[in-house]
Amino acid sequence: MGKIIALGGGEIGRPHEKGGVYPIETTSIDQEIISQTKKKNPKLLFIPTASSDSKGYFKIVKKHFSKLGCEVNVLYLIKEKLSKKQIEEKILATDIIYVGGGNTLKMMTLWRKLGVDDLLRKAHHQGIVLSGLSAGSICWFKYGNSDSRKFAQRNDQLIKVAGLGLINALHCPHYDLESNRQEDLKKMMKTTPKIVAIALDNCCALEVIDNKYRILNSKPTAKAYKIYWKTGKYFQEEIPPKKEFEKLDNLLKK
C-alpha cells in the first residue's frame, strides 16, 4: 500500500528577507497528507538533508505541522552520525515522512550511501505517507529536473537527477515560479524519451494512492502538466484537479 503526496512548491511560514514571514500557502494539501494517515495526531518525520540539515527549516516545519495536529520529529543525517538501525527506527516508526527542499543531488547521494533510499522504499511498502516539496517531491520520482548545481557551483544550469523511482516519471517542481524551468524541461524530455514528465506549479501536488492518482491545489491558479515528446512533437497537457482518483497507468503513458 503506497501513499505519496508530492508538492511542486509553496510557503509554510519561511522568514521574509525584508522582515516578517511569507504567507502560508499549502495548508489544504498538508491537511490531505495528514488525512491519509487516518490518525488525528500523526507522527511526522521531517528529513532536511537537501538543506544540509537546516535547524531553522526544521523550526518552520515543526511550527506549521504542530498547528495542524502533528507530533513533529526530525532526522538529521549530516549533523548527527546515526547508526543504520537508529535511522531505520526513526523512518519506520513514523506516520508521515516530509522531505524538505534544497540540493536534490547532494541528498540522493547521501541517502544511497547510508541506505536511506531502501528504507524509504520499505516505508512506502508499509503505507507510511511520503511527502515533501521541491527536492522533497523530486525524490519520489524516477528522475527530477533539478537546480542542484546552484548550491555548490553557483550554476543555474538545471540537471537530471535520479530519484527513488516510486513514480515512473520525471518530475519538475516550481514550474510557474522559475522562468528557466519550462524551456529546460522541454530539452530534458527530448533526451528522456521512455517516460513522461509531471510538472507542478507551486501550491500544486500529485497525490498517488496505490495505483491511482489525482491533482490537488491550494491555490486556484496552480496547475499541473503532463509533458512528453512523441513522433517528433512536443506535448504539454494540463492535468486538471479532481476529487476523484484516476488510474495512474493512464497518466504515465504517452
Image (cartoon, rainbow, N blue to C red):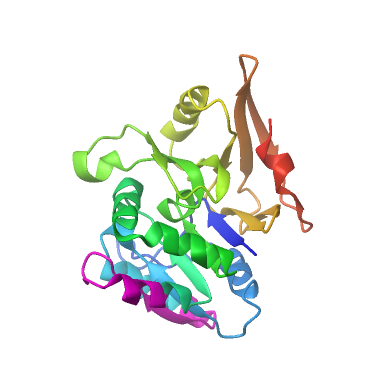
The question of residue 195 being in magenta is answered with no
Q: Position of residue 83 (x, y in %)?
A: 27, 73
Give me the residue at 30% from left, 60% from top: 114
Give the percent coordinates (x, y) of residue 237.
68, 33
Looking at the figure, which quarter contains the C terminus? top right
Range drawn in magenta:
65-90
Going by the image, does 80 lie left or right of 91? left
Q: Is residue 17 visible?
A: no
Q: Is residue 88 magenta?
A: yes
* Residue for point 32% across, 32% down: 157
Measured as percent of width and height from the top left, residue 143 is found at 47, 41
Question: Can you tell which quarter of the image residue 13 is in?
Answer: bottom left
Residue in the picture at 34% in, 75% down: 85
Side (left or right) of 253 relative to 14: right
Residue 62 seen in this snapshot: yes
Q: Is residue 210 above or below residue 163?
A: below
Residue 236 in the image: above or below residue 70: above
Q: Residue furthest right?
A: 244
